[in-house]
Image: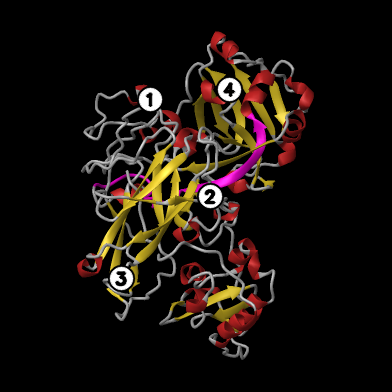
Amino acid sequence: MWGHAFSVGRASAAVVMPGAMAAALMAGASTTAADGKTFTRKQVEQHTTPETGIYVTYKESVYDITEFVANHPGGTDKIMMAAGKAIDPYWRIYQQHTNSATPSELLAAMKIGELDKSEAPTVVDESDPYSSDPERHPGLLFHNTKPANAELPPALAMQDWVTPADLWFIRHHHPVPEVKGAEYALKANGLGIDTVKEEGFGADSLKGGLKLSLDGLKERFEPTEVTTTIQCGGNRRGGFNHIAKTSGIAWQFGAISTAVWKGVLLREVLEEAGLTSPKVAEKMGVKHIIFKAIDGLQASIPVEKALNPYGDVLLAYEMNGEPLPREHGYPLRLVVPGSVGIRNVKWVGEITTSDVEAVGPWQRGIAYKGFSPNVKSFEGVDVEKVLSMHEMPVQSAIVSPISGTKVAVEDKDANETVTVAGWAWSGGGRGIVRVDVSTDGGKTWNTAELGEGKDQNPSRAWAWTFWELELPVPSDALAKGGMEICCRATDASYCVQVRALTATIAASIILVVVASVTLVASDATVDSTIDANPAGPKITTTATYLTATALPCHALAGKPREDMEHPWSE
């Protein structure tokens, strides 16, 4: 599967512009006086286009930013994510807005009123099991809210190599648990481990078994940091729906994020609890380590991954230098670098060493299995006997430009280029060695320059790699009115994304996406209509399945059908 997308140029950070440039921007901003006007939040939400006026709120004030949008130093795509909403969450993440007086001064010139203080506060229905879920960043692209499932928006996907916690994709199956850290205890049992009795939650309770408080875990084991990308198994599923209907969440390409995790190595905890070596595990018949979450989910990983000294499996209690947020697993979550998202169990409460894998749909169900594309019915198929998904295949995506973008070309005879940027990643810690980009359907290729992430250990490259290319525009592209761009990645095992068109595509397969770009002459009128809250890139795709030409390449295949449900992809 090759990768996708198009906005001209790579997403760049919002820039604070002092001096003459700031003055110029301020001159272009509206200076409408507030005149004591008040607005309800509902009224603000109705102003999201140039025709209606583009309003935002900050703290308790309302601002008309319509004339400023085109001049926003960070790009129109980013500022429009807040259209009709509060900009406070964005300013908290991109603190260059508050580290200088200039953004506030610019904003003050656009003030048109205040929020209505008499507006009734939002009523929380405490009978709703989701009423205590955390507040979420409005920039995320939500597929649903109960349970919450949201993806990283394209405009912010490459803003930071390490994704801010507030912008991390969310994949939940239940309400977010409320766990009091002081009352939390991690338990372990199973083959080779004698379960400790109820007394004692401190570090000394490890003898004879394991039952540790969060503080006890921190005191007993040395902390370790691992930077890893986690991706939902259904990421990019939505791109298949024009070929055949899929079941489950119609993710675009944002169900993926990267973080720096801090915690304790799982293998050290298991060794201390009695599983002292692979030989002991084999003698005791241990083949799988099962993790049971406080919200009821359970999944497992092979013991070989758990005990691998180079596997870097963590029980994490910090994310990006801060205590683990509730949203992402507080007080303790599993991080399994290089494996599909569902194995990275959040809110871990219990660990079991076992001779069989976890039971239930998250481990043994069809959503995490691979089948031939010709399978159209599960009648007579023992799904549980099919190997469960763990490591993911090599893949890449075009983040910029977004598919459907219109680009002005100065001269049809000139050597025009377009900046194309994206990410690449492979499961199992296999580093990215090359990303190639094509404008002729793969007949010829241009090799991109690898960026952040390229210096990872090629055998333990747990995080994604950014890439960028000044792509030559084909000489006949203007006459044709556009071009399609596709990309493919090659990993350290020299597994390559392979293109093969098929009418039957897996619900969980990693999609090859192609960016469709319209070219217009520089003196033509370019449509500048802005979507205030896009549901994701409008993707023109060439769908594929992967062929496992050599291990450890993994072929994921399956069959989307209207009568089949795939609700569990993490």
| Mark 3 residue type | Ala
Relative vertical location of residue 336 with respect to residue 69 in this rendering, above or below: above
Whole-number angstrom distance, CA of label 1 to CA of label 3: 53 Å
- Percent position of residue 408, x then y: 33, 73
Asked if 548 appears above or below 253 in the picture, the reply is above
Q: Mark 2 touching mark 1, by CB under 8 A?
A: no
Comparing labels 4 and 2, the label whose residue is closer to the camera: 2
Residue at 34% from the left image edge and 28% from the top image edge: 550
Q: Is residue 234 magenta?
A: no
The stretch in magenta equals 244-265
Q: CA distance from mark 2 to mark 3?
A: 31 Å
Checking the image for residue 414, the label placed there is 3
Residues at discs 1 and 4 in contact (Cβ within 8 Å) = no
Disc 2 marks a residue whose amino acid type is: Glu
Q: Residues within 10 Å of mark 2 (few under 14, many from 20)?
A: some
Residue designated by label 2: 452
Q: According to the image, label 4 marks what residue?
A: 307
Image depth: mark 1 or mark 3 in front? 3
Instruction: Specify few, some or many for label 4: CA neighbours under 10 Å numbering under 14, 14-19, or 20 or more.
Output: many
Where does label 1 land, which residue? 387
Mark 2 or mark 1: name the one nearer the start of the chain. Answer: 1
Which label sits in the foreground, 2 or 1? 2
SS at badge 1 = loop
Label 3 SS: loop
Mark 4 to mark 3 CA distance (whole Å): 57 Å
Q: Is residue 392 above or below residue 526?
A: above
Report whether 12 appears left or right of 206: left
Q: Earlier in the sequence, mark 2 or mark 3?
A: 3
